[in-house]
Protein backbone atom coordinates (compact mmCIF):
# COMPACT_ATOMS: atom_id res chain seq x y z
CA UNK A 1 0.00 0.00 0.00
CA UNK A 2 1.34 3.41 -0.98
CA UNK A 3 2.05 6.20 1.47
CA UNK A 4 -0.58 8.38 -0.24
CA UNK A 5 -3.39 5.86 0.38
CA UNK A 6 -2.36 5.51 4.02
CA UNK A 7 -2.66 9.29 4.50
CA UNK A 8 -6.18 9.28 2.98
CA UNK A 9 -7.38 6.51 5.29
CA UNK A 10 -5.85 8.24 8.27
CA UNK A 11 -7.53 11.53 7.35
CA UNK A 12 -10.90 9.82 6.89
CA UNK A 13 -10.67 8.13 10.27
CA UNK A 14 -9.65 11.36 11.94
CA UNK A 15 -12.54 13.21 10.34
CA UNK A 16 -15.03 10.53 11.43
CA UNK A 17 -13.61 10.59 14.95
CA UNK A 18 -13.87 14.38 15.08
CA UNK A 19 -17.51 14.26 13.96
CA UNK A 20 -18.30 11.64 16.64
CA UNK A 21 -16.62 13.68 19.35
CA UNK A 22 -18.42 16.85 18.24
CA UNK A 23 -21.76 15.04 18.18
CA UNK A 24 -21.16 13.63 21.69
CA UNK A 25 -20.24 17.05 23.04
CA UNK A 26 -23.41 18.54 21.58
CA UNK A 27 -25.58 15.80 23.16
CA UNK A 28 -23.97 16.17 26.57
CA UNK A 29 -24.14 19.96 26.51
CA UNK A 30 -27.81 20.27 25.51
CA UNK A 31 -30.87 18.69 27.19
CA UNK A 32 -33.55 17.26 24.95
CA UNK A 33 -36.93 19.17 25.11
CA UNK A 34 -38.70 15.84 25.71
CA UNK A 35 -36.56 15.14 28.75
CA UNK A 36 -37.21 18.68 30.07
CA UNK A 37 -40.98 18.32 29.66
CA UNK A 38 -40.95 14.90 31.31
CA UNK A 39 -39.04 16.25 34.33
CA UNK A 40 -41.43 19.18 34.71
CA UNK A 41 -44.46 16.88 34.56
CA UNK A 42 -42.96 14.55 37.16
CA UNK A 43 -42.35 17.53 39.49
CA UNK A 44 -45.96 18.70 39.15
CA UNK A 45 -47.30 15.22 39.91
CA UNK A 46 -45.08 14.96 43.01
CA UNK A 47 -46.15 18.37 44.36
CA UNK A 48 -49.82 17.60 43.72
CA UNK A 49 -49.54 14.32 45.61
CA UNK A 50 -48.03 16.06 48.62
CA UNK A 51 -50.77 18.73 48.68
CA UNK A 52 -53.51 16.08 48.41
CA UNK A 53 -52.02 14.06 51.28
CA UNK A 54 -51.84 17.13 53.53
CA UNK A 55 -55.38 18.37 52.82
CA UNK A 56 -57.16 15.01 52.75
CA UNK A 57 -59.53 14.58 55.77
CA UNK A 58 -58.83 11.81 58.23
CA UNK A 59 -60.68 8.51 57.60
CA UNK A 60 -64.26 8.74 58.82
CA UNK A 61 -64.06 12.50 59.35
CA UNK A 62 -66.53 13.21 56.55
CA UNK A 63 -69.21 11.16 58.29
CA UNK A 64 -68.46 12.31 61.84
CA UNK A 65 -71.08 14.68 63.31
CA UNK A 66 -69.92 18.18 64.11
CA UNK A 67 -69.39 18.95 67.79
CA UNK A 68 -72.36 20.77 69.32
CA UNK A 69 -71.82 24.33 70.38
CA UNK A 70 -72.95 24.89 73.92
CA UNK A 71 -73.07 28.36 75.38
CA UNK A 72 -71.71 27.38 78.79
CA UNK A 73 -68.27 27.12 80.33
CA UNK A 74 -66.34 23.97 79.53
CA UNK A 75 -66.32 22.79 83.13
CA UNK A 76 -70.04 23.33 83.77
CA UNK A 77 -73.14 21.37 82.87
CA UNK A 78 -75.97 22.69 80.78
CA UNK A 79 -78.69 24.17 82.99
CA UNK A 80 -82.16 22.70 82.50
CA UNK A 81 -85.50 23.87 83.89
CA UNK A 82 -86.74 21.90 86.90
CA UNK A 83 -90.24 23.39 86.68
CA UNK A 84 -92.39 24.03 83.63
CA UNK A 85 -93.54 27.13 81.81
CA UNK A 86 -90.27 29.06 81.62
CA UNK A 87 -86.75 29.04 80.25
CA UNK A 88 -83.98 27.70 82.50
CA UNK A 89 -83.11 30.10 85.29
CA UNK A 90 -79.57 31.44 85.74
CA UNK A 91 -77.21 28.90 87.23
CA UNK A 92 -76.13 29.44 90.82
CA UNK A 93 -72.40 28.86 91.28
CA UNK A 94 -70.84 27.85 94.58
CA UNK A 95 -67.32 28.21 95.90
CA UNK A 96 -65.97 26.68 99.07
CA UNK A 97 -69.25 24.87 99.70
CA UNK A 98 -71.42 28.00 99.60
CA UNK A 99 -73.14 30.34 97.19
CA UNK A 100 -72.64 34.06 97.76
CA UNK A 101 -74.72 36.85 96.21
CA UNK A 102 -74.56 40.61 96.79
CA UNK A 103 -77.44 41.80 98.97
CA UNK A 104 -77.90 44.79 96.68
CA UNK A 105 -79.15 42.37 94.01
CA UNK A 106 -82.49 42.17 95.83
CA UNK A 107 -83.09 45.84 96.51
CA UNK A 108 -85.71 45.81 93.72
CA UNK A 109 -88.06 43.63 95.86
CA UNK A 110 -88.43 41.27 92.91
CA UNK A 111 -88.14 37.49 93.14
CA UNK A 112 -84.86 36.34 91.60
CA UNK A 113 -84.90 32.71 90.47
CA UNK A 114 -81.84 30.44 90.28
CA UNK A 115 -80.96 26.87 89.39
CA UNK A 116 -78.32 24.87 91.19
CA UNK A 117 -77.07 21.66 89.57
CA UNK A 118 -76.59 18.84 92.07
CA UNK A 119 -75.69 15.33 90.91
CA UNK A 120 -76.58 16.43 87.36
CA UNK A 121 -80.08 17.39 88.49
CA UNK A 122 -81.50 20.93 88.70
CA UNK A 123 -82.76 22.43 91.95
CA UNK A 124 -84.70 25.69 91.66
CA UNK A 125 -85.10 28.36 94.31
CA UNK A 126 -85.93 32.04 94.51
CA UNK A 127 -84.69 34.93 96.65
CA UNK A 128 -86.47 38.23 97.28
CA UNK A 129 -86.51 41.12 99.72
CA UNK A 130 -89.87 41.65 101.38
CA UNK A 131 -91.21 45.10 102.26
CA UNK A 132 -89.94 44.75 105.83
CA UNK A 133 -86.38 44.80 104.43
CA UNK A 134 -85.56 41.12 105.03
CA UNK A 135 -84.02 39.06 102.23
CA UNK A 136 -85.76 35.69 102.07
CA UNK A 137 -85.17 32.45 100.17
CA UNK A 138 -87.28 29.40 99.33
CA UNK A 139 -87.32 26.47 96.94
CA UNK A 140 -89.54 26.89 93.91
CA UNK A 141 -91.73 24.10 95.29
CA UNK A 142 -93.79 23.06 98.32
CA UNK A 143 -94.72 19.89 100.18
CA UNK A 144 -98.10 19.64 98.47
CA UNK A 145 -97.81 20.70 94.83
CA UNK A 146 -94.14 19.91 94.12
CA UNK A 147 -95.04 16.86 91.98
CA UNK A 148 -96.76 19.15 89.45
CA UNK A 149 -93.46 21.01 89.02
CA UNK A 150 -95.07 24.37 88.33
CA UNK A 151 -93.36 26.48 91.00
CA UNK A 152 -94.36 30.00 92.06
CA UNK A 153 -94.85 33.39 90.47
CA UNK A 154 -94.71 36.80 92.10
CA UNK A 155 -97.72 39.09 92.26
CA UNK A 156 -96.70 42.28 94.04
CA UNK A 157 -96.01 41.41 97.68
CA UNK A 158 -97.23 37.83 97.48
CA UNK A 159 -95.98 34.59 95.89
CA UNK A 160 -98.62 32.54 94.05
CA UNK A 161 -98.55 28.77 93.58
CA UNK A 162 -98.85 28.08 89.84
CA UNK A 163 -100.55 24.75 90.52
CA UNK A 164 -103.28 25.49 93.07
CA UNK A 165 -103.36 29.31 92.95
CA UNK A 166 -102.92 29.86 96.70
CA UNK A 167 -101.24 33.11 97.67
CA UNK A 168 -98.53 33.61 100.28
CA UNK A 169 -97.31 36.98 101.62
CA UNK A 170 -93.58 37.44 100.98
CA UNK A 171 -93.10 38.38 104.66
CA UNK A 172 -94.12 34.85 105.68
CA UNK A 173 -91.41 33.11 103.64
CA UNK A 174 -88.82 31.46 105.93
CA UNK A 175 -91.32 31.93 108.79
CA UNK A 176 -94.31 29.76 107.86
CA UNK A 177 -93.67 26.39 106.28
CA UNK A 178 -95.48 23.19 105.41
CA UNK A 179 -98.55 22.65 103.28
CA UNK A 180 -98.47 24.75 100.13
CA UNK A 181 -96.15 27.41 101.56
CA UNK A 182 -92.89 27.81 99.62
CA UNK A 183 -90.44 25.40 101.21
CA UNK A 184 -87.92 27.59 103.09
CA UNK A 185 -84.22 27.63 102.17
CA UNK A 186 -81.76 28.46 104.94
CA UNK A 187 -79.58 31.52 104.35
CA UNK A 188 -77.32 33.84 106.31
CA UNK A 189 -76.00 37.35 105.80
CA UNK A 190 -72.26 37.91 105.94
CA UNK A 191 -71.26 41.51 105.43
CA UNK A 192 -72.94 42.70 102.25
CA UNK A 193 -73.50 39.17 100.89
CA UNK A 194 -76.26 36.62 101.15
CA UNK A 195 -74.73 33.20 101.81
CA UNK A 196 -76.45 29.86 101.18
CA UNK A 197 -74.68 26.58 101.94
CA UNK A 198 -74.59 23.96 99.20
CA UNK A 199 -75.75 21.26 101.62
CA UNK A 200 -78.88 23.29 102.33
CA UNK A 201 -79.60 23.66 98.62
CA UNK A 202 -79.04 19.92 98.11
CA UNK A 203 -81.82 19.20 100.63
CA UNK A 204 -84.30 20.49 98.04
CA UNK A 205 -83.44 17.74 95.58
CA UNK A 206 -86.46 15.76 96.78
CA UNK A 207 -88.78 18.37 95.28
CA UNK A 208 -87.34 18.11 91.77
Image (spheres, rainbow, N blue to C red):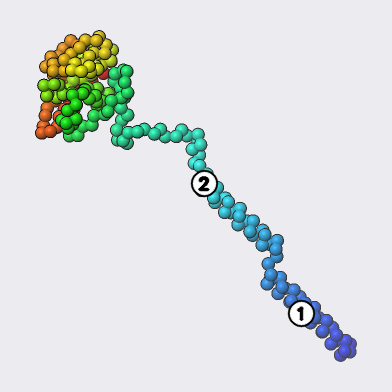
User: Relative to residue 192, is residue 163 drawn left or right?
Assistant: right
Label 2's element? Answer: helix
Relative to 10, residue 194 above or below? above
Residue 182 seen by the camera: no
Left or right position of 12 against 35: right
> In the drawing, what numbered circle is on residue 55?
2
Q: Position of residue 125 (x, y in %)?
A: 22, 22
Q: Is residue 93 above or below residue 131?
A: below
User: Marks 2 and 1, how far apart in space?
Assistant: 56 Å
Left or right: residue 131 versus residue 72 is: left
Q: Residues within 10 Å of mark 2 (few under 14, many from 20)?
A: few
Q: Residue at x 24, y 10 (%)?
A: 165
Q: Nearer the viewer, mark 2 or mark 1?
A: 2
Which residue is drawn at the image coordinates 39% and 34% (left, top)? Answer: 69
Nearer to us in this view, 128 or 53? 128
Residue shown at 16%/18% (left/top)? 170
Where is mark 1, residue-wise?
A: 18
**Residue sitting at x 58%, y 51%:** 48
- Residue 61, x across and y down, in percent: 49, 38
Q: Determine if residue 29 is in view.
A: yes
Question: Reading the chain from its start, which is encountered first: label 2 or label 1?
Answer: 1
Tell me the SS state at disc 1: helix
Figure quadrant of residue 178: top left
Amino acid sequence: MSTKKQYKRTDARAAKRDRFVASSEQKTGRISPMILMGGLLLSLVTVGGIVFALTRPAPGAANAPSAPVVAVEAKTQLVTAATSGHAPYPRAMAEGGAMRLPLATFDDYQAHYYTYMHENRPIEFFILKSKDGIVRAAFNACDVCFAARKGYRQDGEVMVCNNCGRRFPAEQINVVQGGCNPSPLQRTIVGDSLVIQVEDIADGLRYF
